[in-house]
Image (tube, grey):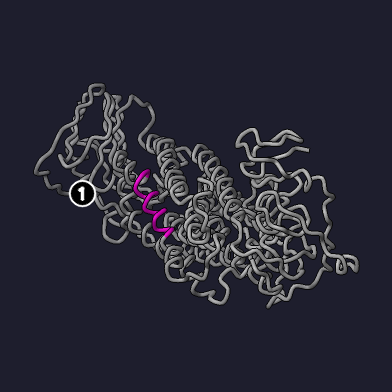
Amino acid sequence: MTEQGQLEGPPLVTCPHCGRTVPAGNFCGHCGAHLPSASTTRRHAFAAVPTERVAHLSIISTLFPHLPHRRGGAFRWALLAGGAAVLVLAALHLFAPATVAATLLLPVLYLLYLYEVEVYEDEPWLVIGATMVTGAVLGYAFTAFSGRAVSLLNLTGDRDNSFVLAGVAIPIVAQALMLAGPLLLYVFRGRFREPLDGLTFGAASALGFTLTSSLTKFWPAITGSLVSGGDPIDWSLRLLQVGILVSLINASTTALVAAAVWLQRYDRRRISRPWASSILATLIVAFGAQLVVGMLTFALPNVATEVLIRLVAALALLLYVRLVIHQALMVEGVEHEIGPDSPCPECHRIVPTMTFCPSCGAARAAGSKLGRARVGGTA
Amino acid sequence: MAMFCGRCGAQVAAGAPFCGRCGAPQVTQAVAAAPIYSYPVAVPARSPRRFGTSQIAIAGVLLAILAAVTVAVTAFAVSQAIGGSRATCTVNCAPKFVTPLPESRTFRSSAFKYEVDYSSAWTVRSQDANGVLLGTRLGTLEVVGSRSTLPPDQTIKSAVAALPSAQWQNVVQVSDLKGAHIGDQNGLGAVYSANLIGANSTITKVQFAVIAATRNGVTVVIVAVDPADLKGSPHGIPEAQDFDYLCAEFRWA
């Protein structure tokens, strides 16, 4: 910290949006409004990572919102390296190892993320058990149960019943099961109260579910011969679906609903909350997306078409998740405190500890819990 | 510089006293005009991580896990490929006796004038002048006629090659089908295993038999698919007896 900064400190101004007296800067430390433009929506500065727009496509900063921007690079590289490894294995016709690597990629990254940001505070086994492990157990049980029926209908050529089961019932039931673990935490662990906690738990549960569900579906291929016949491009597209797109869709839909449920408890000003982050809207989007994707991929059973449908759905859902995260983080804090100076975990400037960083606008709630505990933040 | 309403977020003209959309008074000019305070940058401090996790370590751990799992699966797959527990048929597996069906229906090909009886419990999925596709209790059975000039062994290979590779993966011939026949015409047959990818990307391990026979310039191909049951069924095909019955009850023109 500079000598001048310590002695003088920032001047105080009145935020034009919330009317509070806050330290001068780019953003209101209380409500997060962009002070120079007085924009409360501040779509140009995503509340979790203000250097990105809200409408910005990024897997890491969307599904890993607690991760400081500067630590995101390692996760990005790990994702790319894992994807490249899957493609190399598929190109060598090693489809069984490629399938396992593809299905494990995002769940393993998410476990590392949970460790890195310590969202579970002092109950790691409870949180991981209620989210990833519960999701994984339900995913295996459900897919093993429903898979027999789907296989039978596939083999006997019964497309009508197969459509009802695989295109409609399975996506809906699977989505409901993916929400089970996070909702248990919601009911029994009220101290995880921030909307981003819910989002993280939802994504973790969905990734655990998708992992075992995909492994169960692909088990005959995994336990088959080492070098398999088949077109590597076809398999690469299929593994892109399983490893990335299905995981992204499931994580996004479940995270959406979980974040909205947590926000309902966290935000006391429900009337003024945007509709996009309401429980009803997120439920409609989540179950609707699963239903539409399920029906379309059944009706157009071509690998390239399926990839295209899932790609569009995944991108749209990621953007929606970012909107919900942004709106959840922009909820004004109940208390208005100007805390002691501390480094912002996002921009690393020495700023008064408030709900939002006055300099870069990052929400303190989006920082890692370890970092917040270290500086004794109030957010 | 673009200005925005503090209440609804709509863009407003610079100096406008009220928002054009919601009518909120615009009192932001004084703040906007003020120079933005610049906060000092913190001196980078080493993060007190419990195990000294760095960015490279995260990527390393991920790759190590992926590598370990990949090696494990590869080893398992190699052991499967070398040790191979697939049972091959070592006896004449063609049925000597068939049990008549209690109720049966008949399909007649208008193009090739052949007839075939099948169980009334089976469902016709599609049919045309050349043949019929039947949904059985566990799988499917297709009978197709053509005026092919290929010998039966080539007909079988071309029928297998024509299976769409996006759905039929890892197609491997398991054994020849000894004593294969269609009606009273001797033919050739082979049993294959494959992974069938169906709806919801569900993969099912299947066994299927392809039988071909030719008479008077008409070639008939029968393809019967069932879920693989390597322990409990001849050739790993649970409905083999029913399929054999259909082959026996085939009547050429």
User: Which residue is under mark 1?
Assistant: B241
Task: Tell me which segment is drawn in magenta.
Answer: A167-179
Q: Is residue A136 magenta?
A: no
Question: What is the x, y in percent for residue A249?
Answer: 51, 49
Q: Give B136 or A371, whichever is nearer the viewer.
A: A371
Q: Is residue A168 magenta?
A: yes
Question: What is the x, y in percent for residue A185?
Answer: 45, 67
Q: Is residue A7 left or right of residue A152?
A: right
Residue A262 showing in the rendered view: yes
Q: Quadrant of residue A364?
A: bottom right
Judged by its main secondary structure, the magenta piece is: helix
Q: Quadrant of residue B72?
A: bottom right
Q: Give A177 or A94, whichever is nearer the viewer.
A: A177
Question: What is the x, y in percent for residue B107?
Answer: 19, 30
Dot 1: within a 10 Å radius of its alpha carbon, few (fewer than 14), some, or many (20 or more) residues? some
Question: Is A288 drawn above or below residue A73 in the view shown?
Answer: above
SS category of the residue bearing label 1:
helix
- Identified at 40% across, 62% down, the residue is A138
Question: What is the x, y in percent for residue A145?
Answer: 33, 58
User: Where does the C terminus of chain A fall, quadrant-wise?
Assistant: bottom right
**Which amino acid, mark 1?**
Gln
Q: Is residue B173 left or right of residue A86?
A: left
- Identified at 28% across, 45% down, the residue is B139
Residue A226 showing in the rendered view: no
Q: Quadrant of residue A76?
A: bottom right
Residue lying at the far left of the rendered structure:
B102
- Identified at 51% across, 58% down, the residue is A268
Q: Give A320 or B4, whichever is nearer the viewer.
A: B4
User: Where does the N terminus of chain A fall, quadrant-wise?
Assistant: bottom right
Residue lying at the far top of the rendered structure:
B111
Q: Chain of mark 1?
A: B
